[in-house]
């Protein structure tokens, strides 16, 4: 197998994972997968990560939410998701009573119940995956993918493109 085939094989393997990922997020028919991610991040921003009841849920500052969001989601996309989540009734937005510049978001009861249902679905799905694939094997794979991601993040694609183009000129 040559280098090109190896690269394409890796990309195809990751692409095969996406249809199931999209089906899971489709549980929320009224919001996008980015909105689901933002909704789950709001839920998990508060310490404790698991709430026994809706009354335990507290507001989170938008600035804290932005710090917690990973995956290259731009602030404009976060703002758009927050608008979407508010329009469908999953969150409400408030301002700090002492400083109107500070904005907060919190789950509504509908948002909380949706998150709990989604977490149960995810738990059941991944339990089935791990029982077939193996928990240790999945942990090892996760570690390897993270190691690959670390190497990829270190690479400066613009400089690689420039070097490649310079090589072509010579």
Image (cartoon, rainbow, N blue to C red):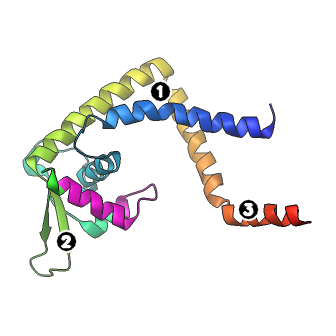
Q: Is residue 2 above or below residue 133?
A: below
Label at residue 3: none
Frontmost of labels 2 and 1 is 2
Look at discs 1 and 3 and give the one toward the viewer. Answer: 3
- Name the residue carrying label 3: 161
C-alpha distance separating marks 2 and 1: 40 Å
| Spatial CA span between label 1 and label 3 | 39 Å
Which quadrant is home to the N terminus?
top right
x and y, in percent, of residue 8 in the image: 68, 37
- Residue 83 lies in the magenta stretch: yes
Q: Which residue is mark 1?
A: 135
Dominant SS type (magenta):
helix
Q: Say whether residue 105 is visible.
A: yes
Q: Which mark is residue 103?
A: 2
Along the viewing direction, whichever of 85 and 109 lies nearer the viewer: 85
Answer with mark 3 or mark 2, whichever residue precedes in sequence: 2
Q: Are marks 2 and 1 in contact (CB under 8 Å)?
A: no
Residue shown at 74% from the left, 61% from the top: 160
In the image, taking residue 107 as reference, residue 66 lies left or right, namely right
Q: From what the image shows, is residue 45 above or below residue 143?
A: below
> Which mark is first along the chain, 1 or 2?
2
Dot 3 crowding, Cα within 10 Å, few <14, some 14–19, many 20+: few
Is 149 in front, or is 80? 80
**Span shown in magenta:** 67-85
Q: Which residue lies most toward the top here?
A: 132
Give how far across and how far down residue 111 sits, in percent. 15, 46
Q: Is residue 65 visible?
A: no
Q: As drawn, is 138 to the left or to the right of 37?
A: right
How crowded pointer 2 is (Cα within 10 Å; few <14, some 14-19, many 20+) is rated as some
Q: Position of residue 2 (x, y in %)?
A: 81, 35
Left or right placement of residue 156 versus residue 22 in this view: right
């Amino acid at each position: 197998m040559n280098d090109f085939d190896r690269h394409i094989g890796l990309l195809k393997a990751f692409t095969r994972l996406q249809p199931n990922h999209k089906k899971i997020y489709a549980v929320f028919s009224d919001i996008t997968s980015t909105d689901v991610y933002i909704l789950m991040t709001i839920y998990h921003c508060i310490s404790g990560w698991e709430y026994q009841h809706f009354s335990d849920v507290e507001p989170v500052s938008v600035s804290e939410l932005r710090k917690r969001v990973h995956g290259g989601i731009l602030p404009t996309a976060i703002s758009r998701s927050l608008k979407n989540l508010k329009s469908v009734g999953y969150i409400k937005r408030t301002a700090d009573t002492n400083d109107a510049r500070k904005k907060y978001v919190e789950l509504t009861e509908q948002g909380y119940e949706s998150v709990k249902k989604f977490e149960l679905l995810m738990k059941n799905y991944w339990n089935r995956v791990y029982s077939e694939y193996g928990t240790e094997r999945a942990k090892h794979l996760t570690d390897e993918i993270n190691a690959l991601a670390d190497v990829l993040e270190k690479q400066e694609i613009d400089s690689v493109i420039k070097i490649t183009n310079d090589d072509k000129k010579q």
